[in-house]
Amino acid sequence: MLGLWSIPSSPLRLRLHIAFSATLDDVVRSVSALRTKGIVPRGGGGGPEIDEPVVFPWMPAASVYFDDPDGHSLEYISILPDAPRPDLTGRVRLSEWRLMNTRQVG
């Protein structure tokens, strides 16, 4: 059983975060699928709206965040097969990540 409270009624006033493992194709498709439902896809941390998944280079993983109706942070995430890049800070767009990895291989 999973219990979620709305932010104002949460016993500790917590904003919860839950990540759902998904295929990379599903993470990519989630951006437009969320928009068709009127949900804003974000790059995490309450950041700006995105038009493609973001990648956390240190993992690496492609990710799309969004809020549920009660304000909790939900995430679709797909671990990528590439080598981690802890030297890169923050997040990069998936298209940028793919370019960087193409250059490393080729």
Image (cartoon, rainbow, N blue to C red):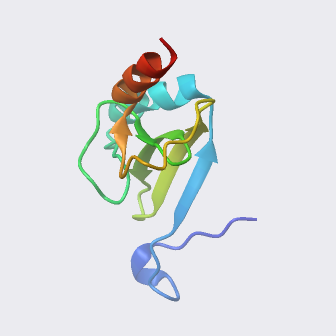
Q: In which image quadrant can residue 73 be found?
A: bottom left
- Relative vertical location of residue 103 with respect to residue 15 in this rendering, above or below: above
Label count reads 0
Q: In which image quadrant can residue 41 be found?
A: top left
Residue furthest to the top: 106
Residue drawn at point x = 46 percent, y = 72 percent: 6
Residue drawn at point x = 45 percent, y = 63 percent: 72
- Relative vertical location of residue 52 with respect to residue 4 in this rendering, above or below: above
- Relative vertical location of residue 46 with respect to residue 104 in this rendering, above or below: below
Residue furthest to the right: 1
The spot of residue 77 in percent (x, y) is 55, 42
The spot of residue 18 in percent (x, y) is 57, 58
The spot of residue 51 in percent (x, y) is 29, 31
Residue furthest to the left: 48
Q: Nearer the viewer, residue 95 or 69?
A: 95
Is residue 60 left or right of 96 when viewed as pictured? right
The spot of residue 80 in percent (x, y) is 59, 33
Q: Nearer the viewer, residue 1 or 27?
A: 27
Residue drawn at point x = 58 percent, y = 52 percent: 19
Residue drawn at point x = 76 percent, y = 65 percent: 1
